[in-house]
Amino acid sequence: YDVIESRKLADPETSYTARLLAKGTQKVAQKLGEEAVEAVIAAVSESQERLIRESADVLYHLLVLWTAKGVKPA
């Protein structure tokens, strides 16, 4: 979370997180939804490795959404 939080002020040209945050909360939420669907698909029809990768994407995008909305993990 702290790394993602620190990227709020990073250059969007060099940081995917900064670029995503610059697009706004709606885009961040959309990406979280897309990743969640991919995790569900992986859980029911793909390998455990694929589920692990997709789950990591869900967690990352959730933390980006929290950052966008000012939510702290604590």
Image: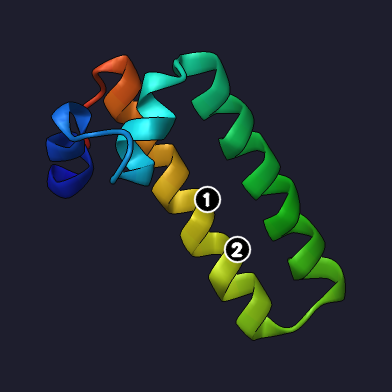
Question: With respect to residue 62, does 42 lie above or below?
Answer: below
Residue 48 % position (x, y): 66, 83
Q: Residues within 10 Å of mark 1 (few under 14, many from 20)?
A: many
Query: Quadrant where the C terminus lies?
Result: top left
Res 20 quadrant in image:
top left
Residue 63 % position (x, y): 34, 40
Question: With respect to residue 55, does 13 lie above or below?
Answer: above
Residue at 33% x, 28% y: name it: 66
Find numbered disc 2 in the image and state the secondary structure of the residue it sits on: helix
Q: Name the residue under label 2.
A: 54
Outermost residue, right side = 45
Find numbered disc 1 in the image and state the secondary structure of the residue it sits on: helix
In screen coordinates, is 32 left or right of 70? right
Q: Mark 1 points at which residue?
A: 58
Q: Residues within 10 Å of mark 2 (few under 14, many from 20)?
A: many
- Three-letter code for the amino acid on which mark 2 is drawn: Glu
Question: With respect to residue 24, does 11 lie above or below?
Answer: below
Question: With respect to residue 37, does 24 lie above or below?
Answer: above
Q: Is residue 17 visible?
A: yes
- Three-letter code for the amino acid on which mark 1 is drawn: Val
Name the mark on residue 38: none
In screen coordinates, is 30 left or right of 42? left
Are dots 2 and 1 in contact, CB under 8 Å? yes
In screen coordinates, is 54 left or right of 7? right
